[in-house]
């Protein structure tokens, strides 16, 4: 089981490396890692399990964060509608790629955090509001999905990790709370 002990922190060189693409068929160690990354997110969102294992809640995690420099991430965004039990977007993404995106930008009103960053970094992180994402499932099946708003932001944060980019690289160092033109601020879902 992945816990915070497996998550590498700021300063670790792997977080600044460009991760390697995967080839199919995946070997079982990579399939297992994908499943473990998604299980970590689901566990981290369960208040009892999160407390017991001291997990920070997460909606996304990238393989480089557990020191595996490969292009794989997991995303688990629960439904905004508490009536619905199916998540808004939940997937293990292999070799994910944003193939097109809106000009319109968005950002979370409370900024972003990162499981690999043990401090608060204030400031808006501009993201594309809509993205078209191509990726492969663990089986090798190719997928293409359109995402917007929160799920799109999460996927952009995770793909950045595959390219050695941290969320605060996008914050305006002069004025962290400056809003670029053509940006919409999204009420953060962070509780
Ligand atoms: C990735 C996210 C940071 C901003 C905004 C938020 C949380 C993360 C990092 C965009 C992507 C992890 C991976 C949350 C969270 C909202 C939904 C459902 C019920 C609790 C959960 C809390 F956990 N960030 N954590 N940070 N990262 N919202 N939510 N809620 O996920 O570093 O690279 O369970
Ligand atoms: Ni992160």
Image (cartoon, rainbow, N blue to C red):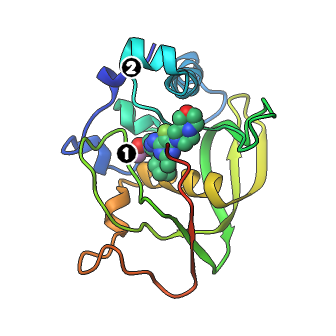
User: In the figure, is residue 181 to the left or right of 100?
Assistant: left
Label 1 beta carbon within 8 A of ligand 2: yes
Establish if 72 lies above or below 26. below
Q: Where in the figure is residue 89, as x and y percent of width and height?
A: 71, 42
Residue 54 makes an appearance in the image: yes
Q: Circle 1: is it few (<14), some (14-19), or many (20+) Cα within 10 Å?
A: many
| Dot label at residue 114 | 1
Q: Where in the figure is residue 56, as x and y percent of width and height?
A: 40, 30
Looking at the image, the residue that sits furthest to the bottom is 181
Badge 1 or badge 2: first in the primary sequence: 2
Residue at 48 percent of width and 36 percent of height: 58
Report the label total.
2
Q: Where in the figure is residue 29, as x and y percent of width and height?
A: 52, 18
SS at mark 1 in the image: loop
Residue identified by numbered label 2? 3
Q: Nearer the viewer, residue 63 or 149?
A: 149
Residue at 53 percent of width and 20 percent of height: 43
User: In the figure, is residue 62 to the left or right of 102?
Assistant: left
Residue 147 sits in which quadrant? bottom right
């Amino acid at each position: 089981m992945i816990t915070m002990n497996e998550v590498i922190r700021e300063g670790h060189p792997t977080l600044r490396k460009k991760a390697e693409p995967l080839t199919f068929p995946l070997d079982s160690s990579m399939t297992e890692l994908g499943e473990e990354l998604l299980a970590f997110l689901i566990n981290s969102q369960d208040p009892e399990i999160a407390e017991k294992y001291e997990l920070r809640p997460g909606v996304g995690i990238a393989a480089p964060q557990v020191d595996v420099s490969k292009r794989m991430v997991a995303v688990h965004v629960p439904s905004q509608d508490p009536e619905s039990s199916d998540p808004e977007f939940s997937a293990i993404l292999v070799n994910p790629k944003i193939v097109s995106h809106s000009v319109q930008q968005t950002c979370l009103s409370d900024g972003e955090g990162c499981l690999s960053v043990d401090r608060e970094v204030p400031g808006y992180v501009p993201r594309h509001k809509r993205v078209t994402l191509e990726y492969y499932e663990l089986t090798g099946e190719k997928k293409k999905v359109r995402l917007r708003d929160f799920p799109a932001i999460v996927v952009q944060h995770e793909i950045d990790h595959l390219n050695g980019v941290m969320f605060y690289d996008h914050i305006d160092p002069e004025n962290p709370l400056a809003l670029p033109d053509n940006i919409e601020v999204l009420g953060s879902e962070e509780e």
